[in-house]
Every structure is written in C-alpha cells, then in structure tokens.
Amino acid sequence: MNSSEPVPLVSVIVSSYNHAPYIEACIESVLTQTYPNIELLVVDDGSHDGSVEKLRVLQRRLGFDFREQGNKGLASTLNDCIARSRGSLIAPFGSDDVMLPDRIEKQVAYLQGKPEVGICAGEIIHVDARGEPLPRREKRREFRRLDFDDIFLATKDGAPAPTLLFRREALECVGGFDPSVKLEDLLIELKITRAGYFIDVLPDVLAQYRVHQANTYKNRRFMIEAVLATYDQFRDHPAYEQVCARFRNSMLLKCAADDKPLAKELLAQLPVRHWNAKTLRAITRLLFS
C-alpha cells in the first residue's frame, strides 16, 4: 500500500456459536494480523458449550469488543455489528476458522483504487478439527473476477466465505444481510454483484477453513432449503429454472448415497425435462445400493 494513502479501518466481526474448542485460535489470528488498523467485534450468539466463559477470559486478556446475546442467527447478528462498527471495510469471520497473518494487509492493499470491487476474497486451505492440513481437498486456482452471472450460473469457481472482505458501501447499497435466508454468504454475493459490483478473488491463501462434524454444509436439508430460497429471490432471471434444476440434480446425487428419503423428495421436485446423467446415477443408487 502506498504510504501516502490513508489506512482504512477494517471491522472484523466474529459471531460465535458453540465453537469453544476453536474460538481462541480464531480470535488470536485476527489480533495478530500484520495490518495495523483493525477493530474486532465478537458476539456470542447463544452458545451452550462453554464458549462464553472462554471469550470472557480472552476479552479480559486481549481487550476486544465482546457482547453476549440469546440466539438471533448469523444474519441478524452481522447486521447489528455492522451498524455499530466503524470500519469502511467489513470482514465477517467464522468462529471456527483461522486467518493467515497477512490476510487483511493483502486485501486492503489490493482494494486501493478499485471502487468497482465490492468484495475481495482469496483462497483457503482446509484443516481438520485439530488444525492439521487436509491436502487432498486443495485445488490451486488463479485470480478471477466474478459478476452476477458467474455466481448465479456457476460458470466460475466461487469466493470462499472465510475470506470475504466487503466494502461498507456495497453492503449498505443492498440493505445488509437478509435474516430470512439462513445461508447468508451466497445471497449477499448475488445481491452485491447484481447491484453492479464485482467480487475479485485473489490466488493467495488467506485463511484456514476448519472441517468438523458441525460444519453447516454437512446439514443437507438446511443447505438445500437455504440455497433454493436464495435462488428464489432471482426468479426473474431467464436461467432461474435451469439453475434450480442443476442444484437439485447435484444434491440429489449426493443424497442418494447417504440420505435416501431426502433424495426421493428432490427427485419428486425435479421435472423429467431436467433429468440428466446425474439424475440417472442417483436413481441407480436409490434402486441398487
């Protein structure tokens, strides 16, 4: 970053929910960033696993803004924190993930002079519950710029959620996060890109994404309902029906292996005109596995 340019304040928001084994590593990774101008807001959203006690100890030692509340959900918590934060850049961050030390510095430097970029992201590495790398999950990706159709039509790899850094003006332009849809990252990316901003994804690894039994993506029914509810907000798009069918086919194939009742529900929702090779493979699994 040019030393003559102002150093923007970055507000990092951590909504903590039942991540007691991981919260300390998360908090420390934010407060040891090489970037000098960060405010950290932490909210415990109704945890019942000892997270609050750990966070109180950490807050006394490290001095960040910490509040407790009954469970309100992630989107509402993020909106509340954004409203009282002061940064021109906002980084929501999972309480089970870890930032690499120069994450914020790299992203802020990249955003200088690029007002068209509403979100800057980067790559992640997957780690297990103990923080050990899971190398088989990794795939090297190049820099990419995403617009609305890139995300909605899935024509390019998406932006990893643990690395999203938002311009406040982009969030305010679309009214913040939508509490009615429980999978907040996909919807906010679609809304911001439809408003005319781009998402730029750097090739740099910026965070560790922790894989464990409570990851949201492992709750298949939740994921399906949330993604379809997100797509429903863009049903005016000419490819809406095809996008929903593509997603149902993908989830149908996954569910056919380990959740047959849910797979049968998805198959019933899928018009025959949208059947493809994945549909037939899923039906085979349902009949013969």
Image (spheres, rainbow, N blue to C red):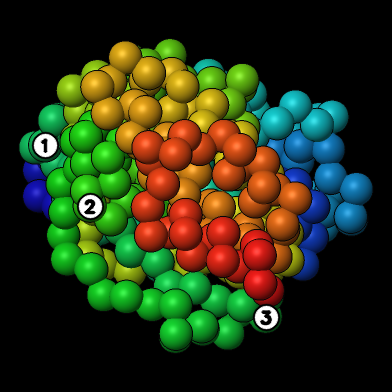
Q: Which amino acid is tagged 2?
A: Lys
Q: Tag 3, which secondary structure?
A: loop
Q: Which amino acid is tagged 3?
A: Arg
Say which residue label 2 marks.
156
Q: Tag 2, which secondary structure?
A: loop
Picture coordinates of residue 144, whole percent (x, y): 16, 54
Against 177, residue 271 (above or below) is: below
Residue at x-position 66% and y-position 65%: 287
CB atoms of marks 2 and 1 within 8 Å: no
Picture coordinates of residue 235, whole percent (x, y): 38, 18
Nearest-to-viewer mark from 3 and 1: 3
Residue at x-position 9% and y-position 37%: 113
Q: Earlier in the sequence, mark 3 or mark 1?
A: 1
Nearest-to-viewer mark from 2 and 1: 2
Left or right: 227 as drawn, with respect to 53: left
Say which residue label 3 marks.
130
Picture coordinates of residue 95, whole percent (x, y): 64, 53
CB atoms of marks 2 and 3 within 8 Å: no
Against 56, residue 80 (above or below) is: above
Residue at x-position 67% and y-position 80%: 130
The image quadrant that residue 86 belongs to is top left
Say which residue label 1 marks.
114
